[in-house]
Image (cartoon, rainbow, N blue to C red):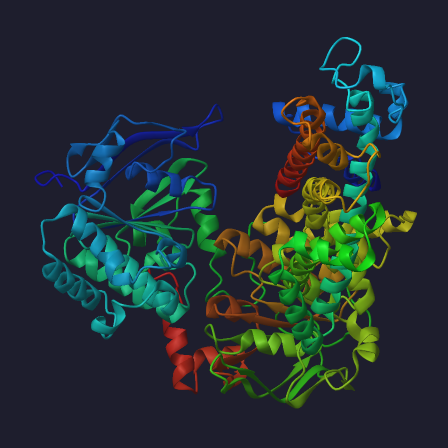
Amino acid sequence: MSEAPAALTVRNLRVGFGTAEPLVRGVSFDIAPGECLAIVGESGSGKSVTARSVLGLAGAHARVTADRLELGGQSVLGLNDRAWRARRGRDVGLVLQDALVSLDPLRPIGREIADSLRLHTTLGATARARRVLELLDAVGLPDPELQVRKLSGQLSGGERQRALIAAAIALNPPLLIADEPTTALDVTVQAQILALLERITLGGTAVLLISHDLAVVSRIAHRVAVMHDGRLVETGRTAQVLGSPRQEQTRRMVAAIPADKPRGTRLSPAERRDTPSIPGTSAVTPTGIPHDRTVVLEAIELAKSFRRPDGSRQLAVDNVSFALNRGSTLGIVGESGSGKTTTARLLLALLAPEHGEVRVFGQPWSAASEKTRRGLRASVGAVYQDALGSFDPRWSVAAVLTDALGVRHGQRAPQTTARLRSLLDEVGLAATVLPRRPLELSGGQRQRVGIARALAGRPEILICDEPVSSLDVSVQAQVLDLLDDVQRERALSLVFISHDLGVVQHVSDHIAVMRAGRIVEIGPAARVFAAPQHQYSAQLLAAVPRLST
Amino acid sequence: MSDLEVQAGLAAQSRQSGPSRRLGAAEAAAGVLALLLLVSASVPHFLAPGDPLAIDPLSAFQPPNLAHGFGTDESGRDIYTRVVHGTQYSLVIGAAATAVGLSLGIVLGTLAGMLGRVVDFTMNRFLEVLFAFPGLLLALLFIVIFGPGVATATIAVGLSTAPGYARIIRAQLITVRSAAFVEAATVLGRTRWQILLRHILPNTLAPLFVLATLGVGQAIVWAATLSYLGLGAEPPTAEWGAMLSAGRTYITSAWWMSFFPGLFIVLTAVTATVLGRSIDRRMRHA
């Protein structure tokens, strides 16, 4: 890249806030026109701050210094707000993670996209409208004429992300920065957005992709830079970095990707704990988890519908049946709106089915009264996606756990301390989290507290509804390993619900694929993955991000 | 991890007190004023040893001077003594009225929020009718029916603030009731009552007490208004609103008769509001 100037040149970039240690400590990289560079790192590694500094958006209190910071060969160091505004949109476009909050909810997306055209070009109103339609067409939104008038709330997640990309490329900027552009999306939509970004690079635009997920970026990135603790620890061609990672952090990130890793493989560097032998269990599966043919949880022809705003009824769960064997894991996978969460709520008897029945240990569960069910509740635990929301905001971790242990708040018998300790040990938390409120914990710690609470009542069945979907891949790896540990140690039976087929593949013995409220395919995990019977399963499977080395 | 560490963690939890944030100047001033008001309400003789009702016709209509800091009224009663002694009426009426409004609001709001759609619908329409009247008009209506007096004025003010509280409680209750942590408590096998008492009510009521502090200021102004109209405390009782009303006749010649009671109504209301807002901010960030 000696003749044409690089789309972006960064040398020794340092960003700090206040008097604290700098968050970004000497980062250097180039992006050539038409190249896609992915910066990958855990949350807090400084990757987003790096991306924002390139746009002059690091914030009013940020101290940004660099030896060189050049967009298309022109230095942008120390530009004032006015000069930055002239460049943003024209020289560099930005696509953010959460399209719902990145778009003004009260303005039609057509006007949102036309904004940059209005500010930076001399195009008239009709020419702008024509260009907006072209852009929407280019990003693959069907019926652009219809879509321009819609508000962001009326679009699906994928459509919104496309609209946001359309706005970012409206002025054909030579550089596009995409910060976690697919994180909140279903796998199939994610695959489509990635394909769109790839098409944009083929058109000569340089793309800086920011993500915590190596598998996602490996599909389209030419080069990968792994960021850790404010530094780029490893940079190289994608295949080379993923195929033969040289640094510890990179190896760890590669190891954290769950897809195609057999059940029981460790995803995080932590060693497996010694599994105490569980008395009374003789049958041991190849993965080392004892389980037998006893059915602990059974769903029989479950159906549940909801009233739409217009009064009609929509079937959210339709004729769902399965059985869960003791000590095994059933993975339920499907995209948003497929009825997974409704199924979870039916299994937890938080909703009553309109048809069919849930049975626990062969006894009536959904058909029983809440009063009789309460006696069995301790045997059925739950882990939620939104761990933070599942804790009373006024309660500290200690209060949450003592309450779950069945000890009244305020009364602390000596044995409570011992039980708390073993619970904290089991989920790998230090006693220092006890006085804190969940709000003050990291995402991974919160989910550990959530798991500890679920385990406090000594359950035999654990219903996990998207337990890792809001976590970074590396934290996800730790939580998945933790679930694997506790399942081994306690011979737990798990229902694991997720939109992420890669995760489900890693944790499940059996898999049920859900679509539009129905189970379209159910069977042993190995069989479903090797030879999917239903076309939709195959489609889902193809969209799973895996390392394409 | 040892038991000791766990115990240390548990101890740290109980040690952890309210947020330590710096006081603003307004909050500090409001705090000092609130303290003064509380002292004058509980032990008025400490600040003003005289009798608030003692008549001294010879020294009537004296402007503020060394002997009478706030001047005297038409019967020669010391305004300062009367203002200090009047604090208890205002504070008690304000606090009692807020308590009445809040309790009624809690009952109505909880019923609407917990008892299903029919009750909720009925309660909402009822509250809407009450909302259609200006609050003070509602209070006047009540007094017209039950006759004037301090007790009726208090209840009247309380009644007129109740619909607002009920609405807020209902909305808050509905939000909290569908929160994920309530569901999590159900999954843990808690009974409806346990969930109501340990999760729903505390999370509903905590923000409400902030509102109540703000409401005390409003209630004091309303109670004074009623007295001013001659529907609450009656002269010669040393109640601020009644004093304001008595001074009205002489406002051109003896301004101090209405100025000082008025000043204290404003100061008390502002104090309550500043404190309420300050508590509100702290709770939000806690």
Camera-side residue: A260 or A473? A473
Q: Is residue A54 left or right of residue B122?
A: left
**What residue occupies the far front of the structure in this picture?**
B58
- Image coords of residue A390 (percent x, y): 65, 59
> Relative to B131, does residue A520 appear above or below in the rendering?
below
Is residue A288 something one can see in this rendering?
no
Name the foreground residue: B71 vs B219: B71
Q: Number of marks in the image? A: 0
Image location (x, y in percent) of residue A230: 42, 35
Does B37 sit left or right of A79 as displayed? right
- Quadrant of residue B259 in the image? top right
| Closest to the observer, A490 or B179 | B179
Quarter of the image with the N terminus of chain B in it:
top right
Please provide percent x and percent y for residue B224.
Answer: 73, 40
Quarter holding the C terminus of chain B?
top right
Determine whether A333 is above or below A224 in the image.
below
The residue positioned 62% from the left and 55% from the top of the image is B134
The structure residue drawn at horizontal position 13% and vertical position 41%, both measured from the top left corner, is A1
Q: Is residue A310 left or right of residue B56?
A: left
- Residue A51 figure quarter: top left
Q: Does residue A130 appear anywhere in the picture? A: yes
At horizontal 46% and vertical 43% (from top left) the residue drawn is A248
Q: Position of residue A458 (x, y in %)?
A: 79, 65
